[in-house]
Image (cartoon, coloured by chain):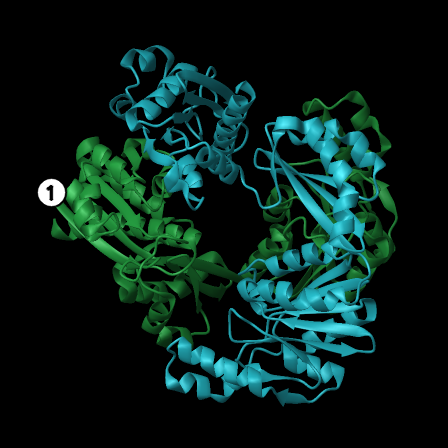
Chain colours: A green, B cyan
Amino acid sequence: MTAEIIAVGTELLLGDILNTNAQFLSQELAKLGVNVYCQTVVGDNADRIYAAYEAAFQRADIVIATGGLGPTQDDLTKETAARFLGREMRLDQASWEKIQAFYQSMNMNADTHTAPNSQKQAIFPEGAVILPNDNGTAPGCCVEREGKTLFLLPGPPNEAIPMYLNAVIPILKTKTDAQFVSKMLKICGVGESAAEEMIKDLIDGQTNPTIAPYAKTSEVWIRVTAKAADEAEAAEIMRPTLEEIRRRLGDHVYGEDEDTLEGVAVKRLLEKKLTIACAESCTGGALTAKLVDCPGVSGTLLEGAVTYSNEAKMRRLNVRAETLQKYGAVSAETAAEMARGAAETAGADIGVATTGVAGPGGGSLKKPVGLVYLGLHYRSRTSVKELRLAGDRQKIRARTVVNALDMIRRRLLEEEEEE
Amino acid sequence: MTAEIIAVGTELLLGDILNTNAQFLSQELAKLGVNVYCQTVVGDNADRIYAAYEAAFQRADIVIATGGLGPTQDDLTKETAARFLGREMRLDQASWEKIQAFYQSMNMNADTHTAPNSQKQAIFPEGAVILPNDNGTAPGCCVEREGKTLFLLPGPPNEAIPMYLNAVIPILKTKTDAQFVSKMLKICGVGESAAEEMIKDLIDGQTNPTIAPYAKTSEVWIRVTAKAADEAEAAEIMRPTLEEIRRRLGDHVYGEDEDTLEGVAVKRLLEKKLTIACAESCTGGALTAKLVDCPGVSGTLLEGAVTYSNEAKMRRLNVRAETLQKYGAVSAETAAEMARGAAETAGADIGVATTGVAGPGGGSLKKPVGLVYLGLHYRSRTSVKELRLAGDRQKIRARTVVNALDMIRRRLLEEEEEE
C-alpha cells in the first residue's frame, strides 16, 4: 500500500514553519508498512491544492492532507477536496455543537462562535467520516473514492498528531494485513562506524527484521523493525536479533525506545538511594539542567555548581591553587579535584565534574578546542576521562554533557559488577 | 519569478530526518522576492525524480533540488537531471582533484579516493556551472534550459546552506530586479496579541514595508520586509516603520536580527564591567548554561549555583531556615534571599535567582504548576518578579530562563535611566 502526504499552508512555503507533520506521518506510515513515495507542500490556493490531489490520487492508495481546515477564507482544503471528489458540502450538526461548546469554554466573546465563519469548520464533503479534534476546533475527516482514501487533518501538530493516533490508525489498520513494529536500542560510548562494524553481518544478512543505525549527538541508535501480522508476532521475530545486538554491544546499550541517558542515570541513582552533586566549567550548567529535566530528580540531586572562574573553583569546590597553577583549569587533576570537591562540599555520594575548552577562543596547541576532562568521585575513588571532541562550541558542550551522563551510568554499572 | 524545491532522499520519506532545507530555501527565496509555490520530497528513485523535475519545470522558473549528489549508486539526482535535460555527463577535472585532496586531508585510506564511486561526485551534466562545496565532497551545479534554471545542491544542511549563500544567491540576483530585505525586531516582556495590538494600525496600513509578528518562547519577533532595488533603498523604506515600532514598544525591544537575549545581557554586563552570579532552583542550571552560550562570558560570570534542595539553598546561599519554613521554597522571599545570597557569596555585583513549580508534580492550589519567582539583587537592592507560566515542565523552565535574562537586561536599562 502506498501513501502521499500533502501539507497545505502558505506559511510552509514562506519557510515560517517547519513541516514536522510530514516527518511524523512518514514515520508512522512506515510503521504500518505503508510506503510513502512523495510529500508535497502547496499554499492556500484552490487550484494548486486541486492539482496536488489529482497527482497524489494517480499514484497512491492513501492521501493524507494536513492544514487548511480552519474558519477563515484562506482555509480551502476541505472545499477543494469536495470539488475534486464531486461531493456536496454538508453541515455536521454534532461537530457544530461541539465547536460552539469549545468556544464557550474558552471564554471567547459571544460573537465568535455565532459568526458564520466558525461554522465552516463543521461543514464536510458528503459521506465523510468525521475525525474528532480534542485539541482544537476544526475536526478532520476521511473520504473514500474508488478504493482510495483521503484523510484531511488540521495543520497544528498538537491537533494533527493525536487525531492521527486516535482516529486515522484504526482506519488504516483495516486496510493493511501486515504491520511494521520497531524497537530502538540506544547506545552510548561507541561511535557509529564502530557500532555498525560490530553488527555488520547482522545488518547485511537480515530482511525481517531489518536493522538500521542512526548517529546522534555522541550516541548511536539502532532501529530494529519487524513486519508481522500483529505486535506479538513482531516481538517474537525481533527477539533473537535484539538479544544478539545487546550481547555484542554489551554495556554500550543504555536503554531502548523512549529511554534517555539522563533518565536512566537518574533512575539508577534513585534506586540505589545515592545523592549526586555536579561541578561544571565548560558545560556551564547544562549537565545539571539535563538531570533536572527528569521529574523526581530532587530525590537524588543535591546541587550543582557552575564554577566558571578559577576563583570559584577554589572557593566553592576546594580546588587547590597549586593544581590550577601547575596543570591549568582544563586538566585531569582539576577535573578530579572538582568532582571530589562537589561531592564533599555538598555532602553527596557522587560528584561529577566537567572542564574543557569549548571554543571558539581559548584553544592552544597543547590544549586544543574540544579537549575536555570529566571527573567522577564516588566512594573515595576519583576517576577521570579525557575526551577529544569535534564541533563548534554548542556541539562540544552538548557532547560533554552526554559523555558525563554516560560516565555516571557506567560507574553505577561497575559497582553492580563489583558487588 | 517562481521557484519550486525538490528534496530527494528516502530518509525524508521514512521520516528519519526533517526537511529543514526546504524551510531554509523558502525563507531565503522569499527574501529575494521569489515565490515558492510548491515543495516536493521524493525518494532515491530515478523515475520519481524525473517526474518531479517534469512537474516543477512546467510550473516554475527556478527549480532547486537538494540531496542525492553523493558517491553511491543510490545518488541519482544529477544523472536524472542530465537525462531530463538531454545532456551528457562529463568529468570536471578540477572538482575531481579537489575531491581527492579532501579525502587525503581527511586521512581516509588510500582505496577510498581512487574508487570509481567517489569520482561520480565530479561528473556533471554538460554545460553545468559547478558550485563548490567547502564543507563536504560533493559539489553542486547549476544548469539552464530555455530560460529556466535548475540548481542541484547536496543534502546535508551544513553543505547546502553555505553553498546556497555563497554560490546560488549571486546567480539568482542576476535574474531578479527587485529584492526583499527584512529586519527582525526582537521583543520580550509583552505577549504576542498585546504587541500586535500596539502596532495594529501599522500592520493593516502598510504594503511596503510589510510587518509580521511571530510568537516565540516568551518572546515576540516582528519582521519588517521591504521590496526595493537594493539593500540601501530597502533600508530607507523600512527606517520610519522600524523607528515607529521601536517608539511604541519602547523597552520591550531588546535587539534585532541575530541578537539574542542572553547575548544582549552579557554584552551589557561586560560593557559595564559588572560581574554576575546565578542561583537556580526550578531552571536547574539552564539559566547559567544560556549565559555560557555567549563566548566571552567568563569576563562577567563568576559562578552559578543549582540549589535544588532546601539544604543547598541554606548552605550555599545563606537562605534562612525560617524563610523557607514560613514562605516555602517557591516564594518571593526565598527568591530574594537566593539572589542576594548568590551575589554576596560569589562576591558578584549582581545576583539572579529562579525558584518555581515546573511540574508535572509538586503543584498545589496556592502554588500551582507554573508559579515562578525571579529574584535580582544589585547595588543593595533586591527586586522580585512573580510569573504565572503555562506549558509543560520543559516550557515552564524555558520561559523562566527567558524572563530571568530579560530581568537582568531591564535592571541595567533602569540604571542607565537613573544615571
Q: Quadrant of residue B205?
A: top right
Q: Position of B253 compared to B278: left or right?
A: right
Q: Is residue B63 above or below residue A133?
A: below
Q: Chain of mark 1?
A: A
Instruction: Measuring from the top left, give residue B67's x and y in whole percent.
Output: 60, 70
Instruction: Measuring from the top left, give residue A218's x and y in whole percent.
Output: 37, 58
Q: How many marks?
A: 1
Q: Nearer the viewer, residue B88 or A110?
A: B88
Does residue A153 appear in the picture of this structure?
no
Q: Nearer the viewer, residue A13 or B344?
A: B344
Does residue B404 appear in the picture of this structure?
yes
Instruction: Measuring from the top left, give residue A220's x and y in whole percent.
Output: 39, 61
Q: Nearer the viewer, residue B13 or B320?
A: B320
Crowdedness near tag 1: few (<14), some (14–19) or many (≥20) residues, C-alpha within 10 Å: few
Q: Is residue A207 above or below residue B116?
A: above
Instruction: Measuring from the top left, give residue B251's x and y in whole percent.
Output: 61, 27
Q: Residue most toward the front?
A: B419
- Circle 1 sits on which residue? A380
- Which amino acid does the dot numbered 1 rest on? Ser
Q: Secondary structure at mark 1?
A: loop
Q: Is residue B235 above or below residue B16?
A: above
Quadrant where the N terminus of chain B is found in the figure: bottom right
Q: Nearer the viewer, residue A242 or B19?
A: B19
Q: Residue at x 84, y 56 (%)?
A: A85
